Image: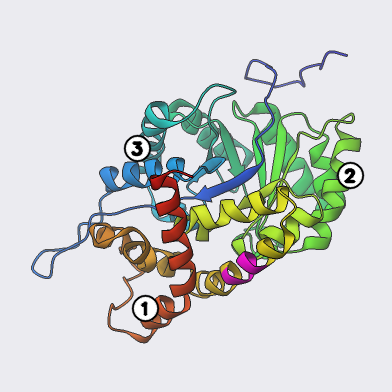
Amino acid sequence: MPITPPSGLVHPLQPIAALPRGVYVPMPAFFHPSSPTSPPDDTLDIPATQRHTARLLAAGVAGLVVHGSNGEAVHLSRRERRAAIEAVADTVRHDADYSHAPFPIIAGCSAQSVRETIELCREARDAGATHALVLPPGYYRGLMDRDGFVGFFREVAERSPLPLVIYNYPAAANGVDLNSDEILALAACPRIVGVKLTCGNTGKLARVVDGAPRVRGGRDDFLVAGGSADFILQGLVVGAHGTISGFANLAPRACVRIGELFEAGRLEEAQELQREVAKADWLAIRYGFVGVKAAMPMFHGPGEASCAVPRLPFKRLDEAGEAVTEIREGMASVLEIEKGLVAKAVGGK
């Protein structure tokens, strides 16, 4: 049965490929560091962005996210947002496998109004993104009811040139936490194709996994992903399609491996690896994107030291400080696991 375009639609209605299962990585924003004798630089480091993109592609991730909360989107200008997406898209064009469908590049396009959100979606599309990741508009939370939040996503989906992934992250949306009924109501929209559940509610995840095919005419094409690496396996057990995890910037192969072990029926090995990843991810959760950045040179070599720089008002964690010591010690086990998986990949299976 053909889909009737809703009124106000400004994009050509075309078939939308389902997002593939697997690990999606919300990339950090990389900035040039300042020297002790120079004023702050913190301009975008495009070479570092492209090196990291290539690294993640080689690790076998399913897709990339640019300008999520891990990527300091709120610290970037519109011009910088476009430049970062273009850098990632350029690397993907050279390195990714396009044999089945375009490699997913999901761009954070969150704003408080429908109009600006759509503008961000258009700019992301023009820069090379394939999908848009959108938060509920929480600034005026007290003046909006639940129907208002659902209506926001429907309005954006009707007019956006990119299909949407819902970003359910209460901490970044003034406490707005979409429930499973609301997410399923949005899953019925053909141009809303997935959800990232950073709320960490695996019961909600299970309900959405169960209900989405029913509201989408029997198709299992609505990506349901957890929002951190500490419950990849728990999500897979109840039917999740993968994860969108900031920790995967550090140990992408370990995160991918959890899914491989689960699919192969090697549950005890998957459980053991998940426990190690969860312990390390707790430090990434506690210290946030600044902690993930601090760990970049630990996992990817001293040449990535510049990747540890956040944008003011945030400051780089002190290399000799307690936080970095705790991160180094707490992530040591997963670092060794990741090194072993890299060595195995390089040396051949």
Q: Is residue 108 visible?
A: no
Q: Nearer the viewer, residue 227 or 110?
A: 227
Q: Is residue 144 above or below residue 292?
A: above
In percent of the image, x 65 and y 36: which residue is there?
20
- State which region is magenta: 272-276
Question: Mark 2 against mark 3, which lies toward the viewer?
Answer: 2
Circle 3: residue type: Ala
**Secondary structure under the numbered disc 3 in the rendered image:** helix
Q: Residue furthest bottom?
A: 322
User: Contact (CB < 8 A) between labels 2 and 3?
Assistant: no
CA separation in Å, label 2 and label 3: 38 Å
Circle 2: residue type: Gly
Residue at image mark 2? 211
Q: Where, by quadrant of the figure, is residue 216 drawn?
A: top right
User: Contact (CB < 8 A) between labels 1 and 3?
Assistant: no
Question: Mark 1 against mark 2, which lies toward the viewer?
Answer: 1
**First of labels 2, 3 by sequence position:** 3
Judged by its main secondary structure, the magenta piece is helix
Q: Is residue 72 visible?
A: yes
Label number found at residue 83 = 3
CA separation in Å, label 1 and label 2: 43 Å
Pinpoint residue 138: horizontal percent, then vertical percent: 65, 57
Q: Where, by quadrant of the figure, is residue 319 drawn?
A: bottom left
Residue at image mark 1? 324
Q: Is residue 295 left or right of residue 117?
A: left
